[in-house]
Image (tube, coloured by chain):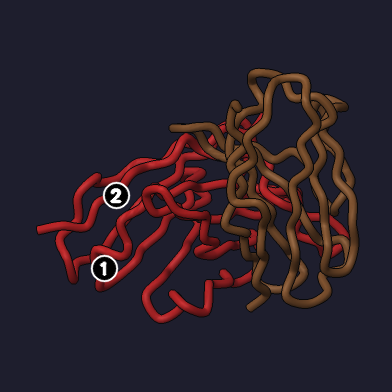
Chain colours: A red, B brown
Amino acid sequence: QVRLQESGPGLVQPSETLSLTCTVSGDSISSSLYYWVWIRQPPGKALEWIGSVYYSESAFYNPSLKSRVTISVDTSKNQLSLKLTSVTAADTAVYYCATGAYGSGSYYPPGYWGQGSLVTVSS
Amino acid sequence: EIVLTQSPATLSLSPGERATLSCRASQSISTYLAWYQQKPGQAPRLLIYDASNRLTGIPARFSGSGSGTDFTLTISSLEPEDFAVYYCQQRSNWPTFGQGTKVEIK
């Protein structure tokens, strides 16, 4: 069973860069069976898909965040990372990494999630 | 962007009752719809994918139906652990989520 654990600063200054890491265990992040995704949830609000990556392809980003987001994979550490630049209070949220099955050209909904990491943007 | 509208926002029911949750898409998404359950302080849990396929280990009281733009999640008989927020999510286009339906104890 795949397990995911997010880590990173819980407080980020406005206009700075939010950086989070997701450590994957139980399977290889290079596996052709999975894709990897970051999803966030502002306090008391709904979920928002930030972006996703499949090991052999470029990452895909939410059009509303595309200019500020970078998702990358470190296969040597079996980690997924998220960078979000120029943050504002609107970026305050619980950030989840998750993974879903990939097969026959389809990206199935994520069935494995990390516990989430609360990031607050404030001075 | 495909907008998913969930209704009602809140459903107040008693244990043992039947819950019917709706998710409507702003355009046709075939059957590319999933349902998640989220409890306070926890990550969402995937229940159903592609409208009606229940994940292994999900109780049979959870069922999904629908296609095109109208979808339903039914919980046939509510158990105490089912009181939570439920989200729908589409993968027909860029993935989006609905705003959620809270199922609360009446």
Tell me whether the residue at label 2 lies in contact with that at label 1, contact meaning CB atoms closer than 8 angstroms.
no
Q: Residue at x 82, y 70 (%)?
A: B29
Q: Position of residue B16 (x, y in %)?
A: 77, 20
Quadrant of the rendering where the C terminus of chain B is positioned:
top right
Q: Residue at x 22, y 57 (%)?
A: A121
Relative side of A51 to B46, left or right: left
Quadrant of the rendering where the N terminus of chain B is positioned:
bottom right
Residue type of the residue flagged with mark 1: Val
Q: Residue at x 65, y 65 (%)?
A: B95
Relative side of A25 to A15, left or right: right
Q: Position of residue A116 (x, y in %)?
A: 43, 40
The outermost residue toward the left is A123
Locate residue B20: give its quadrant.
top right
Host chain of mark 2: A
Q: Nearer the viewer, residue A74 or A113?
A: A113
Q: Which residue has dot 2 on it?
A: A119
Q: CA distance from mark 2 to mark 1?
A: 11 Å
Relative side of B23 to A72, left or right: right
Answer above or below: position of A44 versus A63. Answer: above
Which structural element holds mark 1? loop
Residue type of the residue flagged with mark 2: Val
Q: Tag on residue A87?
A: 1
Answer above or below: position of A59 versus A27. Answer: below
